[in-house]
Amino acid sequence: MVESENPSFRGSEADSHLARTLLRLREMILAGEFEPGERISEAPLAARMGVSRTPIRLTLERLAHEGLLEPYPSGGFIVRKFTLDNLWEGIEVRGLIEGGAARIAAERLEHERDLDNLRKCQAEMDTLGEPTVETFPAYLELNEKFHAEVIRLAKNDTLKHVLDRLLSLPLASRRALVSLQTKFPESKEIFVIARDQHLQMIEAIAKRQGARAESIAREHAQISRRALELILGHAEALVSLPGGPLIQR
């Protein structure tokens, strides 16, 4: 039997095609290629993207589940509008989730060596120092790894799933905000505070201080609000952020 005739291969190929379609359409929406409130229907979108209607249908349903789209009464979907209140609420909820993860990680820590990856991430970030244009991509990846490691230490798949869904919304992710805050003079102060909070979080988890770890992680999430408030003073910066064009100021 040739590979293309294998049902499992065809299934894998279809999943890959769906994933690419989902990624592409999500990026198009976040880049502002559709206006907030604009209706999106299967047939025109399938023709525009050059794919069949089946992956388009599944992609639209998935993006509605993520919160980027809303069902339209007479069929299809519309691009969701976001307000500043939605952003503040998203950051607050992220703080609750990540705070809970830090607390659970502290409570469930079994061995000191379980923190090796977390400490390694922070050590590599410290080696890079304050991000520059050249070191920023590496810093960004290490920052994401740090927070992913805290989630892993919590050993809670449901918590991870909820956080992943939240981070798919406009400007909810750390990556989007950190990428622009480095362009402003105030970013150095934010960087120093964020680094200190990372170190405090590691210490609290290591000492099994769940309440303290939670408090630090929740406060750390507010760094995003501070960065966003900074960015809101620069309209052109907000528009350039993934999801920025969807924000109704």
Image (tube, helix red, strand yellow):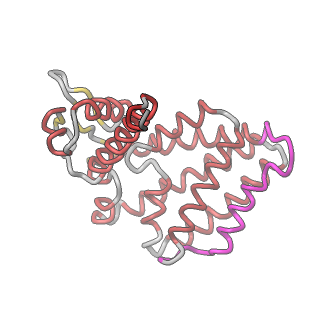
Please name the residue shown 68% across and 58% down the image.
198
Asked if the magenta segment contains residue 32, the reply would be no
Q: Which residues are magenta?
A: 106-133
Relative to residue 213, is residue 147 drawn left or right? left
Name the residue: 75% across, 45% down: 212
On screen, residue 6 versus residue 145, left or right, reads left
Q: Is residue 149 left or right of residue 44?
A: right
Decide which of 7, 236 is in the foreground and name it: 7
User: In the image, what residue occupies the spot 85% across and 41% down?
Assistant: 110
Picture coordinates of residue 237, whole percent (x, y): 33, 65
Q: Is residue 226 left or right of residue 239?
A: right
Residue drawn at x 40%, y 43% is 169
Q: Position of residue 63 (x, y in %)?
A: 34, 35
Q: Between residue 105 and residue 152, name the one nearer to us.
A: 152
Q: Quadrant of the N terminus?
A: top left
**Would you identify the image quadrant in which residue 88 lies?**
top left
Q: Is 83 above or below relative to 180? A: above
Is 227 above or below relative to 50? below
Return the x and y of residue 176 as percentages of the image width and height.
43, 57
Which residue is outermost to the top? Answer: 74
The spot of residue 28 in percent (x, y) is 27, 50
Q: How many marks?
A: 0
Magenta highlight: main SS: helix
In the image shown, does 102 or 91 lie closer to the viewer? Answer: 102
| Residue 116 lies in the magenta-colored region | yes
